[in-house]
Each structure stands twice: as C-alpha cells, then as structure tokens.
Amino acid sequence: MSKISEKLRYVGVNDLKKTAFEGMWPLPYGVSYNSYLILDGKTALIDTAEADFATEYMDNIRKELGDRKVDYLIVNHMEPDHSSLMKVIRETWPEVTIVANAKTVPMIKGYYGICDNVHIVKEGDSISLGASSLTFHMTPMVHWPETMMTYFDEEKTLFSGDAFGTFGALEGGVTDSVVRLHGSDVPTGNAFHAFADEMRRYYSNIVGKYGQTVQAALKKLSGLEISRICSTHGPVWEKNIPEVVSCYDRLSRYEGEKGVCIAYASMYGNTAKAAESLASELEKRGVPYAVHDLCTEHVSYAYRDAFKYDTLVVGAPTYNNDIFPPAYNFMYGIAARLMKNRRFAAFGSFTWAGASVKLLNGMASGLGFELLSDGLSFPQAFTPEKCDMGALADTIASQVTE
Ligand SMILES: Cc1cc2nc3c(=O)[nH]c(=O)nc-3n(C[C@H](O)[C@H](O)[C@H](O)COP(=O)(O)O)c2cc1C
Ligand SMILES: [Fe+2]
Ligand SMILES: [Fe+2]
C-alpha cells in the first residue's frame, strides 16, 4: 500500500473515527491525511498528518526509512490536519530542516513554537535531494495564504496540498488504478467515478470561495509536465489526472453542468410538496436534478450540488416576515462562496403575507444570478393551481436543452 515508486512512499493515514471534518463537515466514508516520503540521497517528508494519529504515522515513516533519518520536512500547508505532527518530527529528528515559504514561518512559530533550522523558499526555488530535486510553486489562497505546491522533477510528481483533494478514506491501495473509496461498492479501476461526489463536496465546502485563486494556481501549473498528483486527501492521481484537473477547473470557474439543484426548507410540509412537484415535473422532461432538504440533511450536500448544476431553485416559507432560517443560511453560504453564473428561481408557502420569495430573489440578484421567473409564492397549502411547477420546469427544460 505504501510503495508508490522506488523513491516515493505513502506514509499517510485514514481517519475513520472523526464524524465531522473541521468540526462541521460529515464524513460518511472517512477521510485520509496523506503524507509522502521521498527516499533519495537525502530524504524528504511532504507534510505530516492529524494529531490523533501520531503513533500510526510515525510507524509508517519508520517502516520506510529503516535506519535513515528525515533530512527535510516540506510544509505545503499549515492547516493542522497536515501540520500537527511537525513538532513530533522535529523532536524525533532534531536536525531536520523545515522547508517553508515566508508566509508559513510565523504560523510555524505560532502553532508549534518552532523557529530554528527553517529554510525559507520562494517561487521557483529548488532543493537537491541527490539525483532528484524539489521545486516550489507558490499557490496562495488554495485555500490559506501560505499554501504552496512542491514538484518532484524526476518523477514529474506534484505534491498539491489540499488541491485535487477529496473526502473519503483509501482502501486497497493509494493510487487511482488500485484504490477504492472506503464504504463504497464502486469497483477498483473507477477511482474518479467513486470519489467525484466527495471531491465536489470537499471543494464546494472548503475551497469553494477561492475560485479565482484556484484558477491562478491552475494557470501557473499548466506549464508543468505532471504525471502524478499527490494531494493531501484522497487518491494519488495518475490515470485520472485529466478528469480530476477538469473537475477542479470547472468548479473553480463556477461552471455548472446542465441540471438543477433544488434546495428547500419546510416546517409543515407545504413548501416541501412544491419541491416534490418541481422534481417530478423535471423528471417528466428528462432534466437532471438533485433535491436537498435543508432541515434534515447536512447543508454540505446542497452546496455540492449547487456547485455541480447550472440552475439553483430554492424553496422557503415566510418566517417572521423573512426567509425561513435554514434556507437563509444556505443562501448566505452560497453568497459567502462567491457563487456565480447560476440561473435561479424561488418558491415558498406563507399564510398572511408572503416575503420569502421576494427576499430570496433579492439575494440571488445580488449575486448576479439570472432569475428564471418572479418566483412562486403561494398561500397556505400547495396546489398545482397556486404554484405551477410545470411552467417553471418548462422554462428550465427549454434553457437546459438550448
Ligand atoms: C414562527 C412562524 C413565523 C411565521 N411568520 C410568517 C410571516 O411573517 N408571514 C406569513 O405570511 N406567514 C408566516 N408564517 C406562516 C408560514 O409561512 C406558513 O405556515 C407556511 O405555510 C409554512 O410553510 P411550510 O409548510 O413549508 O413550513 C409563520 C409561521 C411560523 C411558525
Ligand atoms: Fe486545508
Ligand atoms: Fe487538508
């Protein structure tokens, strides 16, 4: 499982215990914290792993190192899921040189109190490991200010940090030709297919706001010949590089596929019935869609499909002359992710004076979304006469098949 090539070893760990990544994102298939060891004349460790896994992680490294020591620790990213074990590495091999960029240095000091033997690198700098060398590319705000990527020239391998990462623990191996998504029955050999939904959910929830800087990074990397991508989460990509890069490119351009994300919240089921009606009208017209209940499901799944599809339809009843809070929160998150290029419609039930649909339209217009209709605000119970989802589905279908 650990040998990627003669010189490159996987020393990361699977986390199947944590229920919420960053304290908030559900992990139905777990997550991996990937770290890599290069064995050349010198040895280099790329990032570390999460604090809880110190014993397993250090065992993984020792197994590959034998009686050698770690010469360099490359710090591509300081989020603690990758930097937590830096102090253990320094205590174990006191002479290890930490390689980091200028923005990383104060973070290393602030988190771990480490100041000495830190080698500062900037764009294009290299270090030699003997026969091979590592070159550093600054990719700020993917998704922290200090994020950088490391290129291992001899094997055309990019250590990309969180970029191209995905939720989901690794089973059966680590490279995309042998790995399986833990807990999934997608057979070996279909890694991109198996991980695509969790890749979109990881991107949309964690990196989603930084489309512009991800685009800048992709542009910068386009000059590199890449035959392997080693991200900090999920599979090592060799076979599926075109699919993975195109997925990240599309997501960071906010370019949706043809289809509809229906996200709704409902207290008593009236707005829910309207959502169901829209789903069945889209089904009849052969339009792809996904429905998310913002009251019972974690919002990360709705964000995933809001990034996936080019049309967003949001349902919320009126609540104290405002948008029912779960739907307001969802829209707030859409705005916080600087979402662009979406067609939009709103719907929702009220009892005495509807306000939610107008307010949702206002939030959508503020983001530059194209409103497909004035919205469907209806009093009390849902009926097709009061809330004509067939007409909305016709409008959507005519645009989707354009
Ligand atoms: C706490 C609360 C506040 C509400 N505020 C309003 C309101 O300001 N204006 C209004 O027309 N209806 C208001 N309603 C009524 C709901 O909008 C109405 O019951 C609607 O049908 C609920 O839709 P649902 O079945 O999809 O939850 C309120 C209901 C509750 C429980
Ligand atoms: Fe991160
Ligand atoms: Fe991470």
Image (cartoon, rainbow, N blue to C red):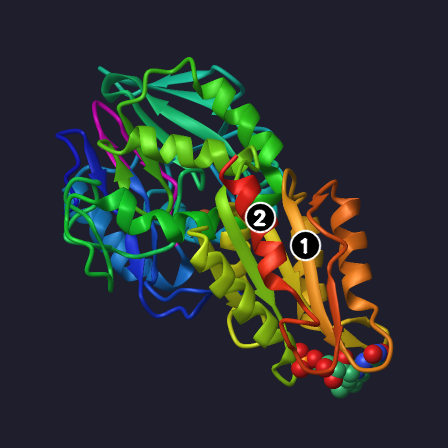
Query: Where's residue 342, x and y in %?
Result: 63, 43
Asked if one can make out residue 7 in the rendered structure from this viewpoint, the answer is yes
For the residue marked with disc 1, what is the amino acid? Ala
Task: Please tell me how crowded label 1 is: few (under 14), some (14-19), or many (20+) other residues with Cα within 10 Å.
Answer: many
Whether 312 is among the magenta residues is no
125 horizontally vs 355: left or right: left
Question: Which dot marks residue 396?
Answer: 2
Residue drawn at (48%, 34%), measured in percent from left and top?
Answer: 250
Q: Is residue 289 above or below residue 52?
A: above
CB of mark 2 near ligand 1 (< 8 Å): no
Region rendered in magenta: 37-49
Asked if one can make out residue 311 in the rendered structure from this viewpoint, the answer is no
Report which residue position mark 1 lands on.
Answer: 345
Camera-side residue: 308 or 178?
Answer: 308
Camera-side residue: 214 or 21?
Answer: 214
The answer to whether the residue labelled 1 contacts the one labelled 2, judged by CB atoms less than 8 Å apart, is yes
* In front: label 1 or label 2: 2
Task: Please tell me how crowded label 2 is: few (under 14), some (14-19), or many (20+) other residues with Cα within 10 Å.
Answer: many
Q: Quadrant of residue 359?
A: bottom right
Query: Where's residue 364, x and y in %?
Result: 74, 50
Residue drawn at (65%, 78%), measured in percent from left and top?
Answer: 382
Q: Quadrant of residue 247?
A: top left
Q: In this view, does 160 lie above or below 129?
A: below
Q: In this view, does 206 lie above or below 241?
A: below
